[in-house]
């Protein structure tokens, strides 16, 4: 019996990166995982892979930048599984440009998914959790919500907004049985970050700024997510935990 046996865990952005690894860790601890991405074939393919290994998983396609999709996602998940015990908001997008080159469409794209989308996923799942009197939410923010490197100003704003609304929801739900926290990863070795880590200039800068002199791993980020989703963190809500090899301590 795993730590999350009998629990239903919904992970947005669950087919890639940190979200993908978190899904596997939750499954290994006995959870039923709902994998969410914009593409049904992508999330179902990963679900089928996990089912083939003896785990419990399903895929639901949704564009979290659209509130109508979010409402359909949550209602479908509850219809299928009866409850959502844990939500992990890991879906996120980025466009790297200098401020003067950003277009309004860039702003809308990043903010709609990273900030508006994650907020309304919290709101829709939160309604269900509050009604049940229990639930845990873990939002994946970013190092860029603490410090901002060049060409990341919109992304940084979206993740800083996530950290702030998380505090607000923690205060609203603290006496209602629902906890919510954020993690702020620095550079984690995922496929999405690989082009940055493989660039010698960026890699030298990252290693020089990181006291531990290396990027993090998806497993390390997933372990933190599972800790915050577990009863071991029962007195933690409204917190943000950097997972950055010491970057923000320097």
Image (cartoon, rainbow, N blue to C red):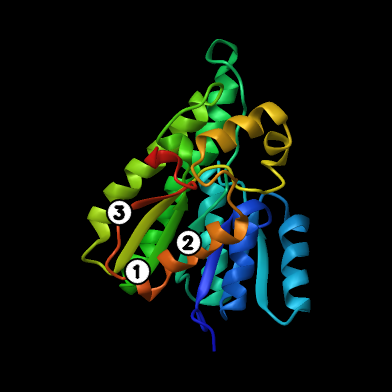
Disc nearer the start of the sequence (1/3): 1
| Side (left or right) of 129 relative to 24 | left
- Give the number of the disc on residue 85: none
Q: Residue 41, relative to residue 48: is it above or below?
A: above
Q: Disc 1 on helix, strand or loop?
A: helix
Counting from the top left corner in percent of width and height, residue 129 is at: 37, 67
Instruction: Please tell me how crowded label 2 is: few (under 14), some (14-19), or many (20+) other residues with Cα within 10 Å.
Output: some
Q: Residue at x 53, y 52 (%)?
A: 70
Disc nearer the start of the sequence (1/2): 2
Counting from the top left corner in percent of width and height, residue 115 is at: 46, 39
Q: Residue 229, relative to residue 42: is it above or below?
A: below
Q: Residue at x 30, y 59 (%)?
A: 237
| Side (left or right) of 175 relative to 13 | left
Q: Residue at x 60, y 38 (%)?
A: 93
Disc nearer the start of the sequence (2/3): 2
Q: Disc 2 on helix, strand or loop?
A: helix
Which residue corresponds to mark 2? 224
Res 124 quadrant in image:
bottom left
Which residue corresponds to mark 3? 238
Res 187 quadrant in image:
top right
| Side (left or right) of 246 relative to 187 | left
Q: Disc 3 on helix, strand or loop?
A: loop
Q: CA distance from mark 2 to mark 3?
A: 15 Å
Residue at far left of view: 175
**In which quadrant of the rendered image does the C terminus lie?**
top left
Q: Residue 58, relative to residue 242: is it above or below?
A: below
Q: CA distance from mark 1 to mark 3?
A: 12 Å
Q: Is residue 97 visible?
A: yes
| Side (left or right) of 15 relative to 122 | right
Which residue corresponds to mark 1? 233
């Amino acid at each position: 019996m795993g730590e999350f046996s009998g629990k239903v865990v919904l992970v947005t952005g669950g087919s890639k990166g940190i979200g993908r690894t978190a899904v596997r860790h939750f499954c290994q601890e006995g959870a039923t995982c709902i994998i969410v991405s914009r593409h049904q074939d992508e999330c179902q393919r990963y679900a089928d892979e996990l089912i083939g290994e003896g785990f419990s998983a399903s895929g639901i396609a949704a564009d979290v930048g659209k509130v109508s999709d979010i409402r359909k996602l949550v209602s479908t998940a509850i219809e299928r599984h009866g409850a959502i015990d844990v939500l992990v908001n890991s879906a996120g997008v980025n466009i790297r440009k200098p401020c003067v080159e950003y277009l309004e469409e860039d702003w809308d794209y990043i903010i709609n998914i990273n900030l508006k989308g994650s907020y309304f996923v919290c709101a829709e799942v939160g309604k269900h959790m509050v009604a049940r009197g229990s639930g845990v939410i873990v939002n994946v923010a970013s190092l860029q919500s603490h410090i901002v490197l060049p060409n990341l100003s919109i992304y940084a704003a979206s993740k800083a907004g996530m950290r702030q609304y998380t505090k607000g929801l923690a205060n609203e739900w603290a006496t209602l049985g629902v906890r919510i926290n954020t993690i702020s990863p620095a550079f984690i070795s995922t496929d999405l970050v690989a082009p940055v880590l493989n660039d010698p200039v960026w890699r030298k800068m990252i290693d020089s700024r990181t006291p531990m002199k290396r990027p993090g791993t998806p497993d390390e980020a997933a372990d933190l997510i599972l800790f915050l989703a577990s009863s071991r963190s029962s007195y933690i809500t409204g917190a943000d935990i950097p997972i950055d090899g010491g970057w923000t301590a320097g």
